[in-house]
């Protein structure tokens, strides 16, 4: 039984690897070409910053949540823009779902829901709490030590990092291979764990294991999403693809999944009370969104 479960998990993982590798190579190109431009855009366009932050945050990986957190701690963007980026960020979930050819179409619904939630929350928060932004800030003159400026190091979540001066093949081939290997390992582990649960409890009881039909499932998803590691979003995506959690719970978990951006916020913020408030607000918005979506889907 165990051998069958592991074999199926390995098969699913290997099938996803080529797609993951292609996606990560493309993302390396996007991040290296446009990170500085994105940083300058969201730090200067204050009126449309929440919308821009949301759209940039939709790009897979947590690099843009790192940018937003670093900029917010320097008061270069508003709280609404920061939360818009964190909410729209899906970390590794989008590549994982795209790698599943049969269910890749689900990405459009996930992104649409997250965009609506992120934009609404971002503008509403800035309306209630007037933005306090350093108008004298210029991204080109005050480089931030994060993926946006790439002065010393380019960092991908917690999976790997590399110097800006390294050869092109390390940046665009070796790093995506390493990233793919790390995410594939997470996929295999989660798939195997779910397979073992199904074998032990029975597929008909899978919903009970993940608290299906209760208010606690979105709450559980949010708790997992707040873990600042790409394993969290991989786990949420895989559990959703297996049909163990609802669409609303998936959105709740992914809205809370800010990846390394949450760690940067905790590390760089001068006020622990403020950081706790931001994370509480992120969790509350994600949870409420999940509950509302579960009522309609």
Image (cartoon, grey):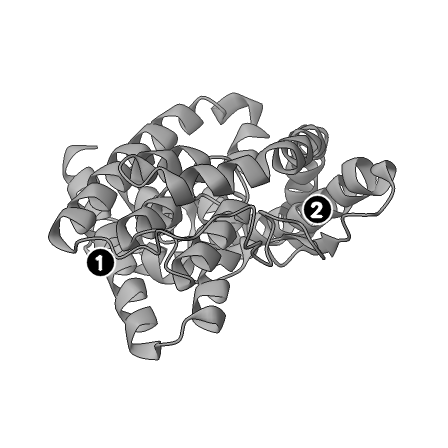
Q: Is 226 positioned to the left or the right of 117 in the image? A: right
Compare residues 247 and 32 and report the one nearer the observer: 32
* Quadrant housing the C terminus: top left
* Residue matched to label 2: 179
- Provide residue 43's location: percent of width, then percent of height: 41, 45
Q: Residue at x 35, y 56 (%)?
A: 134
Please say if 4 is above or below 160: above
Q: Residues within 10 Å of mark 1 (few under 14, many from 20)?
A: some
Q: Residue at x 33, y 57 (%)?
A: 222
- Provide residue 78's location: percent of width, then percent of height: 30, 52
Q: Is 27 positioned to the left or the right of 238 in the image? A: right
Sequence-earlier tag: 2 or 1: 2
Q: Is 135 positioned to the left or the right of 69 in the image? A: left
Helix, strand or loop at label 2? It is: helix
- In the rendered image, the residue lying farthest to the front is 136
Helix, strand or loop at label 1? It is: helix
- Provide residue 263's location: percent of width, then percent of height: 49, 65
Q: Residue at x 16, y 56 (%)?
A: 129
Tag count in the figure?
Answer: 2
Compare residues 215 and 266 and report the one nearer the observer: 266
Q: Residue at x 69, y 51 (%)?
A: 182
Q: Residues within 10 Å of mark 2 (few under 14, many from 20)?
A: many
Q: Are marks 2 and 1 in contact (CB under 8 Å)?
A: no
* Residue matched to label 1: 284
Compare residues 8 and 82 and report the one nearer the observer: 82
Q: Quadrant of residue 270?
A: bottom left
Specify whether residue 242 is in view: no
């Amino acid at each position: 039984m165990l051998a069958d479960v592991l074999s199926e998990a390995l098969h699913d993982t290997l099938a996803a690897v080529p797609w993951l590798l292609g996606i990560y190579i493309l993302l390396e190109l996007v991040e290296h070409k446009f990170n500085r431009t994105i940083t300058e855009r969201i730090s200067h366009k204050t009126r449309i910053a929440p919308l821009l932050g949301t759209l940039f945050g939709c790009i897979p990986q947590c690099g843009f949540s790192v940018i937003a957190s670093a900029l917010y701690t320097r008061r270069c963007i508003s709280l609404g823009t920061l939360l818009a980026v964190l909410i729209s960020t899906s970390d590794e979930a989008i590549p994982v779902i795209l790698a599943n050819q049969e269910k890749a179409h689900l990405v459009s619904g996930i992104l649409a829901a997250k965009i609506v939630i992120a934009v609404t929350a971002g503008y509403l928060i800035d309306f209630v709490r007037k933005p306090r932004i350093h108008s004298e800030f210029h991204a080109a003159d005050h480089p931030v030590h994060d993926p946006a400026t790439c002065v010393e190091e380019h960092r991908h979540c917690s999976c790997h990092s590399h110097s800006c001066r390294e050869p092109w093949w390390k940046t665009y081939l070796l790093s995506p291979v390493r990233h793919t290997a790390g995410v594939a390992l997470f996929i295999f582990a989660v798939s195997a764990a779910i397979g073992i649960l199904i074998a032990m409890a029975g597929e008909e009881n899978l919903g009970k294991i993940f608290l299906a039909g209760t208010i606690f499932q979105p709450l559980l998803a949010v708790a997992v999403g707040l873990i600042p590691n790409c394993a969290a979003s991989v786990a949420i995506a895989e559990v959703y693809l297996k049909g163990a959690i609802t669409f609303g719970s998936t959105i709740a978990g992914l809205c809370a999944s800010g990846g390394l951006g949450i760690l940067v916020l905790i590390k760089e913020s001068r006020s622990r009370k403020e950081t706790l408030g931001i994370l509480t607000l992120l969790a509350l918005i994600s949870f409420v969104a999940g509950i509302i979506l579960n009522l309609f889907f």
